[in-house]
Amino acid sequence: MNLQDLLISLAYRVGPQRLADGSTHAARSMQTGEVAVSNVRGKYTEQTVRGNVFSMVLTAWTTTTAAGNLIAAAAAAVSQFALWNPTGSGKNIALLKFSTWPISGTWGIPSLFHSYMSTNPTIANSALTPVTCNNVGLAAQTIAGYHSSAAGTALTGCSALKVIRQAGLYITAGTLSALMGVSYTDYCDGDIVIPPGYGWAPTWSAAGTTTLGGYSVTWEEVPIV
């Protein structure tokens, strides 16, 4: 790069520009001095294309809300949905999105939370179809431990759960048949990170009455540097 190109690259130009491919240009500024920025593509596209974004879905749990998906669940409680980061994985798990949806029954107090476990389950990975998948369409290569079971299984070896934060979802208490087709999504955008040796599960403040629904979670795996 010559001196002229270097000076151009360090400058800001006010207003839109019409440029040819391969040309050198100045970054754009607004009239009031702000640097103009724009999304080149979707927020998660690059990391998804690189194979670092994964999702897991439980289309429906079938035996009402499990004890392991309630606030302050005891160690090794039965859970229908959980995610954990094995010790020594070399990566952090950053939650991007979490969703839940009603099917039938009656929700109790309308509060849903993100909770963590400070020791991981010792059970093998298990998932209901569709299984954990790499969102670029490749075979699953996740480092995560995961559990997605309609009936629920004990998370043997894990600690009791502690709340991280409220899920930020406004969920109305009452009969779920009136809410069919509604999906509640918490866009975490990486504000919940599961380090190696820790786990995560969605937890309700009350089980409700014969409550049935589903879960989905999407996460990015970030190398620890």
Image (spheres, rainbow, N blue to C red):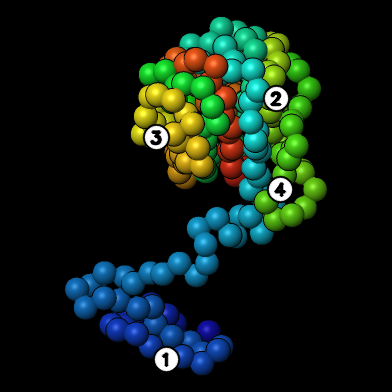
Q: Quadrant of residue 214?
A: top right
Residue 169's disc is 3
* Distance in Å between CA atoms under marks 2 and 1: 54 Å
* Distance in Å between CA atoms under marks 1 and 4: 38 Å
| Residue 89 showing in the rendered view | no
Q: Dot 2 corresponds to which residue?
A: 149
Which one is earlier in the sequence, the residue at label 2 or at label 3?
A: 2
Residue 134's disc is 4
* Residue appearing at x 59%, y 18% in the figure: 64
Disc 4 crowd rating (10 Å Cα; few below 14, some 14-19, many 20+) is many
* Distance in Å between CA atoms under marks 4 and 2: 19 Å
* Distance in Å between CA atoms under marks 3 and 4: 26 Å
Q: Quadrant of the C terminus?
A: top right
Report the number of numbered marks: 4
Asked if residue 151 is positioned above or below residue 179 in the image, the reply reads: above
Residue 18's disc is 1
How far from the left and from the top, in percent, is residue 10? 38, 77
**Secondary structure under the numbered disc 3 in the rendered image:** loop
Observer-side mark, 4 or 2, equals 2
